[in-house]
Image: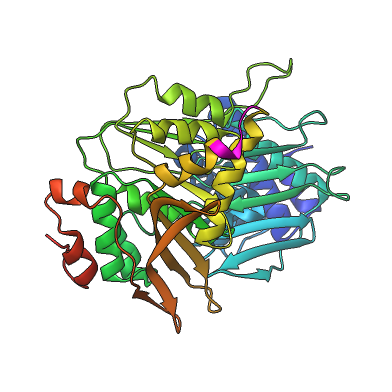
């Protein structure tokens, strides 16, 4: 049956879209184009096919389309994007998308979530998962029912297969939005005060070890990127992550990510492996995207050797973040005890920057804590540099650790903490 007869039997918008979709896919296959890697080529093909279809509709052979731009967009999203979810990926106000079941798709804007009107079929969900993982090198099946991957635009996707969830596959897409590459950008966004930004910028520049803590979606990775923007350009930086999320404006930078085991159960690269390997790559600075398990021990050993570093960690407060840093290394083996871990954390971590989400959805720094290096009654002593009072981040009474490092770099620790607008030089 010819395409014209198919269209005649199925008049209307849906028929037009499906016909154009089929023709575009046919051209893409013939020309050997990878839609996800070359969306520009697909866009040109869609434009050509839509134009041809619109001209044919004038003869009455195919149903007319009133909005050619809408048809163009839908077909392009189907072929080169992620179908009905593509409009949310293209919307700069949408921060995250998640699918609990085909008829319940949510998005988050400004830290608040809402249920969308988008409804998919179970087959469409399966196609979306297959397409999302196609170019990532990650797999998902009965033996590996969940996975993390990175989409071509940098967004991070997490998939859990049905069976682990109650029935349907669960998908989370955390969009990669570059809102802040420097601490000054966070000041402009209202997440940080100029005074606190000046202190953090100087602290990173002189090589203090900074731990960024907070809950899910509190802005930890954004803060990590902003802090890393203060690393001197002459340094060699190695970053280790589960999925690539860090972006640095540093010329001498090597980024590494973990890898799943293959079908034979071999070839897995854990975050712990990356941290160990990074030490053989002559780093001047080490960044670990997120510490969750036994890799915390290897990070502490690296920091304890004098290598400056930055990392993030899930926690409800700066104090809890330090407690967690003391607990995670114990997962590395029975021969690792708190008698070693506690003083090592106290000696290695210099600052803790804790973030939270306000009631209005704004991500803000809640507190900045200095670690003195002292231990009292099995607890690490800390000093609050900045704390939140009446919703505002204000200077507290604590002092910066390692004042000699600031002085060698030309900073005055006293001036940094007293100066609310300058950089303390």
Closer to the camera in the image, 180 or 307: 307
Residue 28 in the image: above or below residue 46:
above
Closer to the camera in the image, 28 or 384: 384
Split into 4 quadrants, where in the image is the C terminus?
A: bottom left
Q: Is residue 32 visible?
A: no
Would residue 208 appear left or right of 20 to someone viewing this image?
left
Closer to the camera in the image, 260 or 231: 231
Q: Position of residue 91 (x, y in %)?
A: 51, 62
Any magenta on residue 337? yes
Q: Which residues are magenta?
A: 335-339
Any magenta on residue 346? no
Colouring style: rainbow
Closer to the camera in the image, 177 or 126: 177
Residue 127 in which image quadrant: top right
Would residue 312 appear left or right of 57 to someone viewing this image?
left
Q: Position of residue 178 (x, y in %)?
A: 40, 54
Query: Would you say the magenta stretch is mainly helix, strand or loop?
Result: loop
Q: Is residue 253 visible?
A: yes
Q: Position of residue 258 (x, y in %)?
A: 56, 30
Kindly identify the residue that appears in the image at 88 percent across and 50 percent down. 166
Split into 4 quadrants, where in the image is the N terminus?
A: top right
Q: Position of residue 220 (x, y in %)?
A: 48, 55
Kindly identify the residue that appears in the image at 54 percent across and 24 percent down. 273
Residue 395 in which image quadrant: bottom left
Would residue 336 appear left or right of 102 to someone viewing this image?
left
Kindly identify the residue that appears in the image at 39 percent across and 59 percent down. 179
Kindly identify the residue that appears in the image at 76 percent across and 31 percent down. 144
Residue lying farthest to the bottom in this orientation: 390
Would residue 77 appear left or right of 245 to someone viewing this image?
right
Residue 71 in which image quadrant: bottom right
Residue 133 in the image: above or below residue 355:
above
């Amino acid at each position: 049956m010819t395409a014209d007869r198919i269209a005649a039997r199925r008049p209307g918008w849906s028929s037009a879209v499906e016909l154009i979709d089929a023709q575009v896919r046919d051209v893409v296959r013939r020309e050997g184009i990878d839609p996800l890697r070359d969306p520009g080529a697909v866009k040109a093909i869609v434009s050509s096919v839509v134009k041809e279809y619109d001209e044919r509709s004038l003869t009455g052979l195919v149903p007319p389309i009133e909005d050619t731009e809408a048809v163009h967009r839908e077909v392009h999203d189907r072929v080169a994007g992620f179908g009905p979810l593509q409009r949310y990926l293209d919307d700069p106000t949408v921060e995250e998308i998640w699918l609990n079941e085909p008829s319940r798709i949510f998005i988050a804007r400004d830290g608040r979530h809402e249920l969308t009107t988008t409804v998919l079929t179970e087959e469409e969900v399966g196609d979306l998962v297959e397409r999302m993982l196609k170019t990532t090198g990650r797999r998902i099946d009965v033996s590996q029912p969940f996975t993390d991957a990175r989409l071509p635009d940098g967004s991070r996707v997490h998939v859990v297969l049905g069976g682990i969830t109650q029935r349907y596959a669960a998908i989370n897409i955390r969009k990669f939005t570059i809102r802040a590459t420097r601490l000054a950008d966070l000041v402009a966004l209202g997440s940080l005060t100029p005074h606190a930004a000046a202190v953090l910028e100087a602290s990173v520049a002189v090589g203090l070890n900074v731990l960024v803590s907070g809950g899910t979606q509190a802005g930890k990775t954004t803060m990590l990127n902003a802090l890393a923007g203060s690393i001197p350009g002459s340094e060699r930086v190695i970053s280790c992550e589960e999925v690539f999320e860090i972006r640095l404006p540093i010329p001498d930078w090597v980024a590494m990510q973990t890898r799943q085991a293959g079908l034979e159960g071999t070839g897995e690269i854990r975050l712990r492996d990356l941290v160990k390997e990074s030490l053989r790559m002559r780093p001047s600075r080490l960044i670990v995207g997120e510490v969750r398990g036994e890799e915390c021990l290897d990070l502490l050993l690296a920091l304890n050797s004098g290598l400056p570093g930055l990392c993030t960690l899930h926690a409800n407060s700066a104090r809890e973040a330090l407690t967690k840093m003391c607990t995670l290394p114990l997962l590395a083996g029975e021969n690792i005890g708190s008698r070693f871990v506690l003083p090592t954390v106290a000696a290695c971590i210099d600052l803790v920057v804790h973030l939270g989400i306000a009631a209005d959805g704004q991500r803000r720094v809640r507190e900045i804590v200095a670690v003195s290096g002292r231990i009292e009654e099995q607890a690490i002593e800390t000093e609050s540099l900045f704390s939140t009072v009446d919703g505002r981040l204000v200077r507290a009474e604590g002092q910066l650790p390692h004042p000699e490092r600031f002085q060698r770099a030309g900073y005055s620790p006293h001036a940094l903490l007293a100066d609310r607008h300058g950089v303390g030089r």
